Image (cartoon, rainbow, N blue to C red):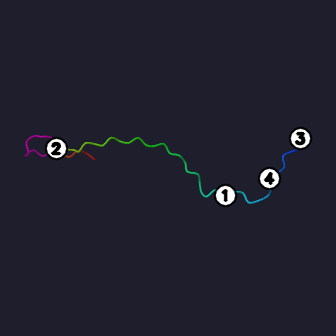
Amino acid sequence: MTRPTPPPPDGPEPVPSGPEPVPREPEPADPPEPPVRPPDGDPEEPVPEPPD
């Protein structure tokens, strides 16, 4: 007959040093936006500002 596995010795359980880090998926890098340059034209014409 096989002997049952003895229970583990009583003792303090190992406490993790902190919460496990959750692996985050890397965010896709946005391509750099080209600098907004006023269109070439009549310098006296007011150039409308692009919306934010």
| Secondary structure category for the residue under label 3 | loop
Badge 4 amino acid: Pro
Percent x, y of residue 29: 38, 42
Badge 3 amino acid: Thr
Badge 2 amino acid: Pro
* Residue ID for mark 3: 2
The numbered disc on residue 38 is 2
- Distance CA(mark 1)–CA(mark 3): 33 Å
- Distance CA(mark 1)–CA(mark 4): 17 Å
Q: Residues within 10 Å of mark 3 (few under 14, many from 20)?
A: few
Label 2 vs 1, first from the N-terminus: 1
Report the span colored magenta. Answer: 38-46
Which of 38/27 is in front?
27
| Secondary structure category for the residue under label 4 | loop
* Residue ID for mark 4: 8
Percent x, y of residue 49: 20, 46
| Secondary structure category for the residue under label 2 | loop
For image coordinates 76% across by 59% down, the residue present is: 11
| Secondary structure category for the residue under label 1 | loop
In this picture, residue 11 sits left or right of residue 52: right
